[in-house]
Image (cartoon, grey):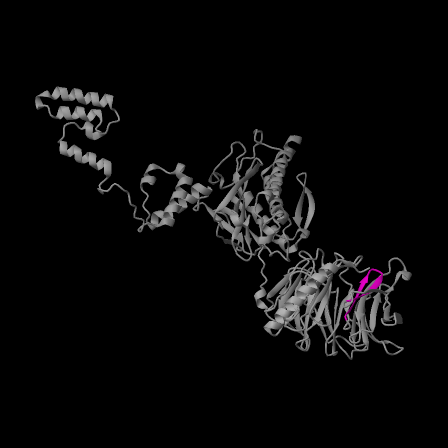
Amino acid sequence: MLPAHLHLILAHSLCSPNMTSNVVDFEDILNNGFSDANTSIRSGARARWERKAQDEDRKFGSSLSDRFIPNRAAMDLEKSSHAIISDRESIGDRTDSELSDDEHTSDSVASDMSEYKTSLLGIDDSKSRILSFSDKAPAPKGDTVNNLEVLYSASSTSRKNKSSTRLVNRHIPSAPTRILDAPDLMDDYYLNLLSWSDTNVLAVALSQTVYLWNAETGAIDELCNVESDGADAHISSVSWIQEGGGHLAVGTSAGKTLLWDVRAQKQLRKMDGHTDRIGALAWNRHILSSGGRDNIIVNHDVRIAEHKTATLSCHTQEVCGLAWSPDGMTLASGANDNKLCLWDATASSSSRPRFQLTEHQAAVKALAWSPHERNLLATGGGTADRCIKFWNTQTGSLLNSVDTGSQVCALQWNPFEKEILSSHGFARNQLCLWKYPTMAKVKELDGHTARVLHMAVSPDGTSVVSAAADETLRFWDVFAPSSKSHTGKRGAAESVGGTKSKQLRTMHTRIR
Amino acid sequence: MVASDTVITLKGSVEIVSEFFFTAINSILYQRGIYQPETFKRESKYGLTVLTTTDAGLLSYLSNVMSQMSTWLSSGDVQRLVVVVSGIDSGETLERWQFNVSVEDGKTVCTGTDENVNGNVSVSGGEKGKKTVKEVHDEIQAIIRQITASVTFLPLLNEPCSFDLLIYTNKQAVVPQKWVDSDPRYIMNSQEVKLRSFTTSFHQVDSMVTYKEADEWEL
């Protein structure tokens, strides 16, 4: 067990003092032969018990146990870990004295920190100032989809969805229940090419032709076309009369307002009044308002021969949004001059609008009157504005404004709940459902691959159709109210499932 | 004196460096998708097509910073420029683009910045360190290319981001009123990638980018 040189020592320590020369010899041998032997041996003669005790010390440490049990209760692990990491990074720059003097008092930590900073970053706090300009750069506007997202296949799923479906207690399907092709649907923000009648017939204008799609039977009829007016002629707006579904107003690129009797498949009237295309139409009982690129709004009384009752001029650019309030007292008009005008129903050609609201910073196309509150109007602005604004039309005051991050193309209130659905352009081309008045985002409906230009709500108020520049119409059951009773809910769910599979089969029916 | 026309003076060097900063910042803002891509216009610079912003607010901010930057560059007070990219909602720093500026005296490359605080750079020509504008532009071109290429390794910026510019100056630098001291805005758990550097014979600019390491479950 004991090494050989210890035997030698033992031998020599038993010898008498007069043999000192031998001892010296031994020591020489030890020093030369075992140069790395430890000092206790070199120190020469000592009592055996003394050496033995030292030997034991070396073997087991002072704790008399054969195990090392660390006690970390008094350690600050975070600090230690920091010290280890920082030490590793800066070990080259540290002197021995610093290494040995590693006491973690607050003073030395602070000095360590600045030292690490110096060695890690090459910047000495005492020699430099970090300055920034107090007027910060403007925050990025609008909503962007990072183009690089395609490089990161998994990250599209990890994108945080800020909308919360917990705000509603009904199920909102995130996929459309039906998709229809709408070839040649014009990608023009300033037109209004979609209207859904209370008899459940959807009118959609595809370039030169108006098609009627019966939502109950799925039958498709061609109503009229303007091919005779030349190759460039197109339908620029359609609007169903409020009740009965018998008459459809059609605005054309030539500035004519056509009134069609749908049941007789016959054109009843051709009304003029505009010199350029008619982008917006709105009915108020027998009054039809038309707004055109010639900046004016014309009110037609469709019953009488002299149909033109008033010409409203206030806008300085193309009128693209028109909407009568549900009580028929106010006409809201939006135009490319970024202005929103509110007109009394009694307005004549000489009168000025009740209010001219200039809050929007882009064209105002999306207009929606609240079915829940009188005098509440929601409006949406174009690409440079991106806001949905809410107005009290009685006082002209702005109630709320929300930046949606992208072009607002259309707005539609939920007839059952205080919710509003907006359709958007670049970058996500989505539909958003918002809770009013908190404007918390309830749901985003993705699917369209180009901007969602138009929206219309079904006569029963449960579903919404959206028409987008990707030349599709998509039907969404966003507003369907939850069933009252539990059993009724189950039954409804089953029937929805049943119709869904049927609808899936009829998906991608072409309109023409 | 054709030769002296192509050699860069201190004034020219300041111009080159601040133009480089402007281009680099714009490239970062475009490549990292911090501002909408349609607000940028194409321009030809350094033999490359670079994209610069057309946003009026952003342009005026950049011109404010750049004009002060030029002043500090001429006096030799700039130590580094940092472009900090941080999330708007989280406020967390996600990327730090760092451009270290060191002043050279035309003969030897100084590693420390404190030796030239007064900016009394000798303009005496004839040293072998002198470079033509063309050579410098080639070096800059390489850095701009690297910024463009960096999107392949940098993590995707998932949230809407904003940016800020930090300028490290000498203690003695004259600071106008509109400038305030800032936090260095370091990144926790960062990864660091060194980019190329360039030198006019007066300023050496080293570039590097540090970024927040993507959490594993995000990849």
Residue at image point 17% right, 25% down? A9
Q: x, y percentage for residue A156?
A: 61, 52
User: Is residue A421 visible in the rendered structure shown here?
Assistant: no
Q: Which residues are magenta?
A: A200-214
**Residue farthest to the right?**
A228
Quadrant assignment for the N terminus of chain A? top left
Image-based side of A67 in relation to B139, left or right: left
Q: Nearer the viewer, residue B152 or A336?
A: B152
> Which of B177/A358 is in front?
A358
Quarter of the image where one finds residue B14: top right
Position in image of residue B102 (x %, y %): 52, 39
* Left or right placement of residue A455 versus residue B103 in this view: right
Q: Position of residue A401 (x, y in %)?
A: 63, 67
Q: Is residue A88 above or below residue A280?
A: above
A75 relative to A414, above or below: above
Whole-percent x and y of residue A140? 61, 56
Whether residue A158 sits left or right of residue A104 in the image: it is right
Q: Name which quarter of the figure residue A451 lies in.
A: bottom right
Does the rendering let one see residue B57?
yes
Residue B17 in magenta stretch: no
Q: Quadrant of residue A21?
A: top left
Quarter of the figure that contains the C terminus of chain A: bottom right
Magenta stretch, overall SS: strand
Front residue of A494/B58: it is: A494
